[in-house]
Amino acid sequence: DGKRYDFATADWHGNRPPRHGDLVDFVTDGQRAGQIYPQEPEYAPPGFGQFYFSPRGRISRSQYWLRFFLPVFAIGAVLAIIAEVGGEAAKALQTIWQLVVLWTSIAILIKRIHDRDKSGALVWALYGPMIPAIIVTVAAVIAVAAGSSEAAWGLGIGAAVLWVIVAGVAIWFFIEFGCMRGTIGANRYGPDPTPS
């Protein structure tokens, strides 16, 4: 109601500590608030564009696996088969698909990170080592093609180390953001996408 009230921690009935800006329902007794219950905002499932292209908000594990991963995996597998039996146009279509899915996968991963109440910048923990791993791997292949075995050997070892780091981070991401439930209740990124 815009007024200020004193309250004791014992009056708080939320499953997390109160934060500035929380919407609450409470009973007043003069200048004291009692029986304080947080009012959780309703989760509105994102539309197509919001789900696939925006990094804002939260999504649940089931949304990640059923609405993103399985369809993208299935389409990617079909395009890979078509690229094997088709010509250059089929391979170009597969490459275009991979480029389109790149941003989508980043945006959706950020929403899963948000669901665990962590900053979306954490996505760089996965993509940060992956970019140099790809560059060093390409450099090693070029060195092999150029016949420079010494350079290829050094670059190959560097690429292997980078790919081990990428694999370790990917395993952590799979467990943390693919398997673990998000924050129960609203967090700083939005309401809980999992019905209670």
Image (spheres, rainbow, N blue to C red):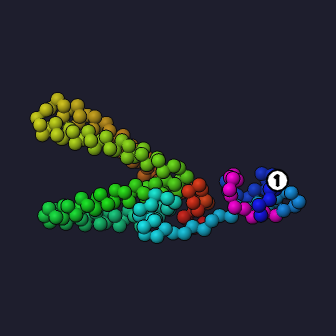
Q: Is residue 44 magenta?
A: no
Instruction: Say which residue appears at 43% left-offset and 49% top-offset.
Output: 123
Image quadrant assignment for residue 152: top left
Name, please, the residue furthest toward the front. 2
Instruction: Provide residue 179's location: percent of width, then percent of height.
Output: 47, 56
**Numbered-mark total:** 1
**Image-based side of 11 in relation to 146, left or right:** right
Instruction: Provide residue 59's location: percent of width, then percent of height.
Output: 49, 62
- Establish if 143 lies above or below 12: above
Q: Is residue 188 visible?
A: yes
Instruction: Provide residue 20's location: percent of width, then percent of height.
Output: 69, 53
The secondary structure making up most of the magenta span is: loop
Name, please, the residue furthest toward the top. 150
Instruction: Provide residue 32's location: percent of width, then percent of height.
Output: 85, 57
Q: Is residue 20 magenta?
A: yes
**Magenta extent:** 17-27
Q: Which amino acid type corresponds to the residue marked 1 in the rendered image? A: Asp
Instruction: Say which residue appears at 38% left-offset and 43% top-offset.
Output: 128
Q: Nearer the viewer, residue 145 or 178?
A: 145
Dot 1: within a 10 Å radius of its alpha carbon, few (fewer than 14), some, or many (20 or more) residues? Answer: few
Image quadrant assignment for residue 151: top left
Look at mark 1 in the image and give the residue it sits on. Answer: 6
Label 1 element class: loop
**Image-based side of 115 in relation to 37, left or right:** left
Q: Nearer the viewer, residue 108 or 55?
A: 55
